[in-house]
Amino acid sequence: MSIVRPLTIAFAFLTRLPVRNGEATDTDIGRTLAFFPVVGWALGVTLSAAAWSAGSLPPPLTAVALIALLAAATGGLHLDGLADVFDALGGGHGDRERMLTIMRDSRIGAHGALALFLVILAKALSVGVILQRGVSWPIVLFPVVGRWAVVPLIVGFPYVREVGVGRTFSERGTTTELMWATMFMVALLLWAGGDAVAPTVLALAAALGFGVWMRRRLGGLTGDVYGAAIELAEVVFLAAATRGS
């Protein structure tokens, strides 16, 4: 089985890079889950190279630039999911159908805006601390961990909507893709060293806990929940890495 096609499709879905992937079949979409961490690694390496290129810029400014670069490279896809989910949580008043309707609304509300502000602020502050300490592994790894941590949510939790690309990911993704994604994650942890283990475990626990909570609220997950889980896993990883870096 060729890995090129699912890899290019993974880049097309998770980034705004001009990748030509043609028409993706449902099977192709399911296979992309194995390469979610690979996309994260490419993003992390790009961020690390950008941090090195920033040279003598103050770490806080470099941190803001890196978070902005990541948002640009991904088209703010996961940030949009984060805002939609927290708008739904804040405005849905526990009503499942109302929450699902709010998540489809392209407009951003107060709850979503606040969630975006807090997540971006937490990321920038954490990256600034990490840069001041002169270590690179958290910058490389945090996009990887976020995209790896969402794979068990996609494979192991039901998808709540009747249609959508998220349903295809959920129905076609299998434990085989989760296994390959995890093997890549483990290889990067061996490269990064023992300090990376605890932040990674905490980020995975945060994503899984969030998935369990949202399943109880909605009866399943959505694409927006996937995006929010990626953002939350990244924040938890970066915050934890400030202690061990």
Image: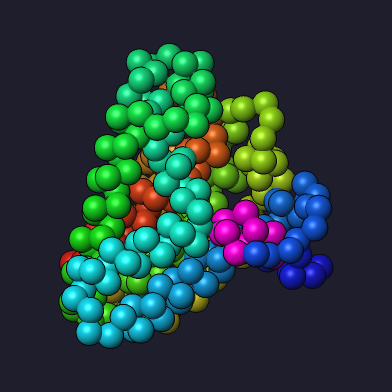
- For residue 156, above or below residue 198: above
Residue 9, magenta (yes or no): yes
User: Is residue 81 rendered to the left or right of residue 112?
Assistant: right
| Residue 178 in sight | no
Does residue 169 sit above or below 64 in this rendering? above
Residue under the point 36% across and 56% down: 234
Location of the N terminus (image quadrant): bottom right
Residue 126 relative to residue 65: left or right: left
Picture coordinates of residue 189, whole percent (x, y): 42, 74
Quadrant of image for the C terminus: bottom left
Name the residue located 74 percent from the left edge and 63 percent from the top edge: 20
Q: Main secondary structure of the magenta part?
A: helix
The stretch in magenta equals 8-17
226 vs 234, left or right, is right
Which residue lies at the image location 41% right of the left edge and 65% below the top edge? 69
The residue at the point 35 percent across, 71 percent down is 139
